Image: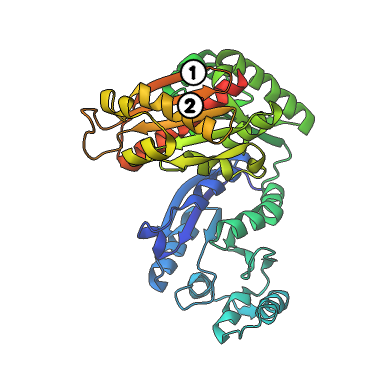
């Protein structure tokens, strides 16, 4: 059994250093290791260079008990993880037949010729614990070297998460002797900032012991991660539910979901529950709002459609905003936003109409500053609501924030 374990995560791939993709694997793995009580002391990213990968491995071997490596297990010449570890350890590489059979089967089923370099993916270190990759080609491995545990995983997040969850997590749990049940619950909030949320929950956060309470700002709102440790799953879940109840008593008006739930999934669910349909008129957001909703399975039952009315003539001639409103009040105004929402709900026969109009930049429009946004919501029974917002950021940030605010407005209308 290992105690006071030091762990680190090494990501291999030049594309990470170039900023072409984000290293989301390290974030996810750190969360998983934390739930096991394993402290992560180091994150490192190294490019596809044999000497640099070997050097990174040698440094990691000196300072850490558990090292998780993601990436560099593919078929091409720049996939160098195995080669670098072999140079450091002189361990023998052998072909893993079940993995090789799967690779060959893939090419046969797709009626394509397998190039010789694909055999590289099936190579594993002799004596290692092979992690069979059900979601991809290259297997993962767990290797013990001079009292250090090395875990090699593919860089593709879906493959990496599958292998870690199914095989690595229970292995590390047994290795560290952690017999406690560790359960987490993520609460999601919208319409309240991280600092305000933390202020209103300060008495709970200061008194926290078990579960722990960790607020975190994200692009889609604020989340609170609750983590409970107990002898049984039932007792851990009871602690989480009690902590959730206390938190929602304070800030429940901003709460919209748990764990992987999204705001759009909850909106679609509420629309179905209330037997209502929605339509959108989007100038500033250019279809972003509709796209978020129709990404949810079953959205066709409640989403009538949308009209992207970016051009003034489209607002007037297609959507039906009055010429007088546009001339006297402008396209970036409360009056225009309300007419857009009313017209789209009428034309598309929806119970709810929502509209977005504003200035995304880079220049002012009709004397309105960049970031000025109007969002209107109307209903078939005559309810009307329009709000003005000033959003900061670049052009696309303003559009994203307007979309998120629109989702928040619809959710709160349906929920409360």
Q: Nearer the viewer, residue 405 or 31?
A: 405
Neighbor class of circle 1 (other Cα within 10 Å; few <14, some 14-19, many 20+) is: some
> At 33% from the left edge and 40% from the top edge, which residue is drawn?
313
The CA span between labels 2 and 1 is 9 Å
> At 49% from the left edge and 33% from the top edge, which residue is drawn?
344
Q: Which of marks 1 and 2 precedes in the sequence?
A: 2
In the rendered image of this protein, does residue 150 appear above or below residue 239?
below
Q: Position of residue 71 (x, y in %)?
A: 51, 64
Q: In which quarter of the image is residue 397?
A: top left
Kindly state the secondary structure of the residue where label 1 is placed. strand
What colour scheme does the image use?
rainbow
Q: Nearer the viewer, residue 177 or 206?
A: 206
The reply to whether dot 2 and dot 1 touch (C-beta < 8 Å) is yes
> At 60% from the left edge and 32% from the top edge, which residue is drawn?
267
Residue 342: mark in rendering: 2
**On the image, numbered disc 1 is attached to which residue?**
384
């Amino acid at each position: 059994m290992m105690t006071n374990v030091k762990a680190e995560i090494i990501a291999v791939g030049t594309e990470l250093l170039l900023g072409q993709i984000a290293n989301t694997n390290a974030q996810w793995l750190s969360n998983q290791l934390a739930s096991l009580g394993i402290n992560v002391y180091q994150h490192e990213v190294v490019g596809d260079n044999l000497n640099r990968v070997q050097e990174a491995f040698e440094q990691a071997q000196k300072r850490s008990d558990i090292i998780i490596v993601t990436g560099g297990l593919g078929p091409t010449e720049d996939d160098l993880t195995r080669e670098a570890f072999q140079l450091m350890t002189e361990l023998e590489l052998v072909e893993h037949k079940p993995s090789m059979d799967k690779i060959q089967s893939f090419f046969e089923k797709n009626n394509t010729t397998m190039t010789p370099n694909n055999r590289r993916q099936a190579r594993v270190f002799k004596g290692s614990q092979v992690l069979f990759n059900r979601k991809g080609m290259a297997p993962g491995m767990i290797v013990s070297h001079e009292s250090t545990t090395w875990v090699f995983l593919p860089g593709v997040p879906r493959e990496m998460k599958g292998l870690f969850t199914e095989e690595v997590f229970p292995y590390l749990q047994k290795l560290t002797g952690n017999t406690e049940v560790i359960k987490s619950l993520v609460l999601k909030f919208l319409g309240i900032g991280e600092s305000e949320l933390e202020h209103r929950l300060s008495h709970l956060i200061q008194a926290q012991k078990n579960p722990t309470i960790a607020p975190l700002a994200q692009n889609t709102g604020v989340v609170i991660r609750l983590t409970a440790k107990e002898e049984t799953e039932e007792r851990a879940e009871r602690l989480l539910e009690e902590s959730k109840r206390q938190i929602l008593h304070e800030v429940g008006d901003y709460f919209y979901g748990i764990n992987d739930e999204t705001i759009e999934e909850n909106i679609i669910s509420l629309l179905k529950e209330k037997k209502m349909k929605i339509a959108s008129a989007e100038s500033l957001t250019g279809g972003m709002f509709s796209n978020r909703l129709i990404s949810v399975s079953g959205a066709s039952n409640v989403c009538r459609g949308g009209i992207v009315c970016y051009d003034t003539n489209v607002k007037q001639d297609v959507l039906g905003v009055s010429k007088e409103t546009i001339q006297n009040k402008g396209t970036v105004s409360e009056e225009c936003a309300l007419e857009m929402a009313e017209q789209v709900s009428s034309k598309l026969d929806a119970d709810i109409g929502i509209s977005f109009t504003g200035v995304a930049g880079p220049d002012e429009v009709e004397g309105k500053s960049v970031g000025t946004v109007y969002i209107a919501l109307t209903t078939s029974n005559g309810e009307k609501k329009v709000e003005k917002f000033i959003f900061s950021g670049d052009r696309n940030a303003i559009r994203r924030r307007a979309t998120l605010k629109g989702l928040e407005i619809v959710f709160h209308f349906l929920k409360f």
